[in-house]
Image (cartoon, rainbow, N blue to C red):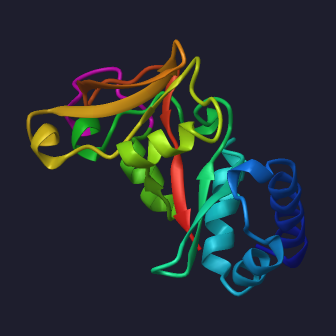
Amino acid sequence: MNAQQKTALLAVLASRFEKNKGRHKGLQWEKIEAKLKGNEKKLVSLNEMESTGGEPDVIGYDKKTDEYLFCDCSAETPKGRRSICYDREAMDTRKEHKPKNNAMDMASAMGVELLTEVQYRALQKLGEFDTKTSSWIQTPEAIRKQGGALFCDRRYDTVFVYHNGAQSYYAVRGFRGLLRV
């Protein structure tokens, strides 16, 4: 990223931070910005989150690791990360109509993690997300070994966790990323 791109991204993040103070009570943008300015790799990840429609914002702070937590806070699962299956193995096992990508590879390339069920439920306490879409979440190995994967959404003012074949993909299913800075 060049200096102009960094400045523009930081301005977008600062504006979003100010508009959504309920997501990060007690945190100060100046401290977060200082950490970001010193970490090019994290800025690149945030830029990927932003450019794929994730609208990343700070949702917490981990005192143990001294890390700020950024998450995709777009109302629906990011548009640039939809119509994908769960992982490479699932993608490779599809015999026809393969998706262009998968959630695990995309997350890894972006430098982010898929949300866990606990993280997804915590995000839903900060707003209403995925009321028309759904998001893949980290799946326990025991489920994945049997060919399944988990995803979540919010319907009827309730967060639901579902299962599907990991190779499945739908126009309204993608993933939300978590980035530690």
Residue 44 lies, in percent from the top left, at 66, 68
What is the quadrant of the N terminus in the image?
bottom right
Q: Main secondary structure of the magenta part?
A: loop
Residue 135 percent location from the top left of the image: 46, 33
Residue 58 appears at what percent x and percent y? 67, 59
Asked if residue 28 lies in the magenta stretch, the reply is no
Magenta segment, which residues? 92-100
Q: Is residue 41 left or right of residue 6?
A: left
Identify the residue shown where x is 52% and y is 12%: 156
The reply, left or right, for residue 39 in relation to residue 133 is right
> Residue at 29% of width from left, 45% of height from top?
88
The quadrant the C terminus occupies is: bottom right
Say left or right for 153 vs 142: right
Residue 180 occupies quadrant: bottom right
Q: Is residue 45 left or right of residue 87?
A: right
Q: 71 above or below 53?
A: below
The residue lying toward the viewer, choosing from 40 and 66, is 66
* 99 in the magenta segment: yes
Residue 116 in percent (x, y) is at: 37, 48
Question: Which residue in the rendered view is the most extreme toward the bottom?
Answer: 38
In the depicted view, which residue is nearer to us: 83 or 164?
164
Q: Examine the rendered structure and indicate whether residue 136 appears above or below residue 62.
A: above
